[in-house]
Image (cartoon, rainbow, N blue to C red):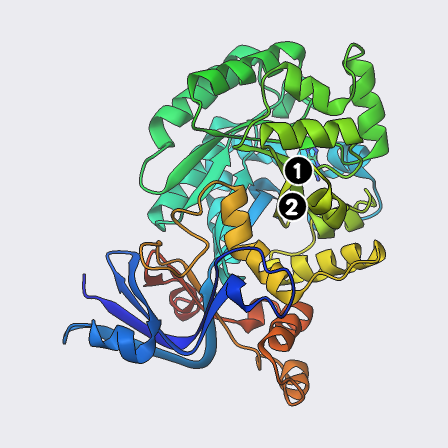
Amino acid sequence: MTDLLLRGRTLTFLRWPDSTDDHGAFRYEEDGGLLIRDGRIVAAGSYADVARQAGAETEKIDHRPHMLLPGFIDAHAHFPQMQVIASHGAELLDWLNKYTFPEETKFRNAQHSRRIARLFLDEMVRHGTTTVAAYCSVHKQSAEAFFEESHGRDMLNIAGKVMMDRNAPEGVLDTPQSGYDDSKALIGEWHGKGRQHYAITPRFAITSSPEQLEMSGALMREYPDLHMQTHLSENYAEIAFTQELYPWSKDYTDIYEHYGLLGEKSLFGHCIHLSEREADALSDSGSVAVFCPTSNLFLGSGLFDYQRYRQREKSLRIATATDVGGGTNYSMLRTMDEGYKVIALNSEKLNPFASFWQMTRGNAEALSVADKVGTLEAGSDADIVVLDSHATPSMRLRMETVEMLAEELFLLQTLGDDRAVREVYVAGKPAKSIMVASGE
Ligand code: GUN
Ligand code: ZN
């Protein structure tokens, strides 16, 4: 495969940026270069320096004046919910029963699973997301379809078959044993194949019996390097029902703790209404709280207190996510725009550098994949998004008054969406322009 040399404004983060003046937190090259070989970035820096390292055969693509960043990372989304987005008028439990569970029953059909897996990853790429932690449906074939599609595109994705054995229609139920067996078979087939990662995925405590949570814990002990993903403390009615189902528990988090599900690769979606004890338990175990702003607003679930969780003595590891189809947009730009507003309701203003850190390196660190993705450093996989700050008439007009990089990033977040994503590279190969060219 020939080398590829990209040129453009490059931006990558080294650590959390405390403010817009925290220039040590990122590297920005006005005329930057990225040399890509075999799906990896092998040199990064000023274009002049990087170009010197390129051989004569190297293919060159000039993206100036656009900005090259690490591909966005979405830490929580449900691929079988593409046709659930925009379902009107319900809070979490009614929304699950009325719209989501019936929709997910369709994924018993392998052909339907394959079609939606393809369309889902198309949407991710179109919106600049190169890694997603995805929930499949309860059906083994939905996870097979997802991994086949993801592997075929050489994407680094994390996914798992949902385990759920009660409080839902028959068509979306497994049993503790079949959930365990199917998960194990999928792990054997897919975990570590190319760039695929398996996540043990008990949906949440309402739809998993104690036996199923026990078996989820057993899987975690058998495969300690795997991710675990579930939902926690999203909605008041959910919390109350959970407490009824597990009357011995101190609180919602205690249930997952009891079954050994907390840990550094454990991703807890929502975490809106945590007590101090619960936040301590997540912090002590290194677990990750996943902020899903568009979903939390759409379902009326509540306001995630991002700054409180970051700044408390025992700070939480935080990731951000679309939570499609409770979430209303596939774009991490739209997600962080809504996140900014939620944080503003708590009288804080998230600085634009912190936002872009969060959707790239921050989410990579939270998902424990920062050694591979989330940066443009030499050695990283070449998952890259190319952003156009002039993509729409309103963006062009507003850009006339923008003077600083932080302002430009904030504009991209506030007004940007898939139209601002000019190109996406997955493992060093163009992925968005190819899709547009083939008319998908
Ligand atoms: N809790 C359990 N399942 C789900 C789901 O599919 N979406 C959301 N937002 N919350 C959940
Ligand atoms: Zn979810």
Residue 299 image position (x, y, % from top left): 79, 45
Instruction: Tell me the residue at 66%/11% (across/down).
Output: 210
Left or right: 382, with 327 as reference point? left
Tell me: is circle 2 under 8 Å from ligand 2: yes
SS type, badge 2: loop
Residue 165 vertical position relative to residue 299 in the rendered view, above or below = above
Residue placed most toward the observer, 405 or 39: 405
**Among the 4 quarters of the image, the one containing residue 438:** bottom left
Instruction: Tell me the residue at 54%/35% (across/down).
Output: 136
Residue 195 image position (x, y, % from top left): 36, 43
Residue 303 image position (x, y, % from top left): 81, 47
Residue placed most toward the observer, 308 or 162: 308
Residue 269 circle label: 1
Q: Amino acid at mark 1?
A: Gly
SS type, badge 1: strand
The crowding category of the residue bearing disc 1, from other C-alpha atoms within 10 Å (few below 14, some 14 to 19, many at least 20), is many
Residue 323 vertical position relative to residue 375 in the rendered view, above or below = above
Q: Tag 2 or tag 1, which sits nearer the N-term?
A: 1
Instruction: Tell me the residue at 68%/84% (across/down).
Output: 398
Where on the image, by quarter, is ligand 1?
A: top right
The crowding category of the residue bearing disc 2, from other C-alpha atoms within 10 Å (few below 14, some 14 to 19, many at least 20), is many
Residue 352 seen by the camera: yes
Left or right: 292, with 151 as reference point? right
Total residue callouts: 2
Instruction: Tell me the residue at 34%/34% (across/down).
Output: 192
C-beta proximity under 8 Å, tags 1 and 2:
yes
Residue 263 vertical position relative to residue 249 in the rendered view, above or below = below
- For the N terminus, give its image quadrant: bottom left
Residue 237 image position (x, y, % from top left): 85, 30
Instruction: Residue under label 2, please give it.
Output: 323
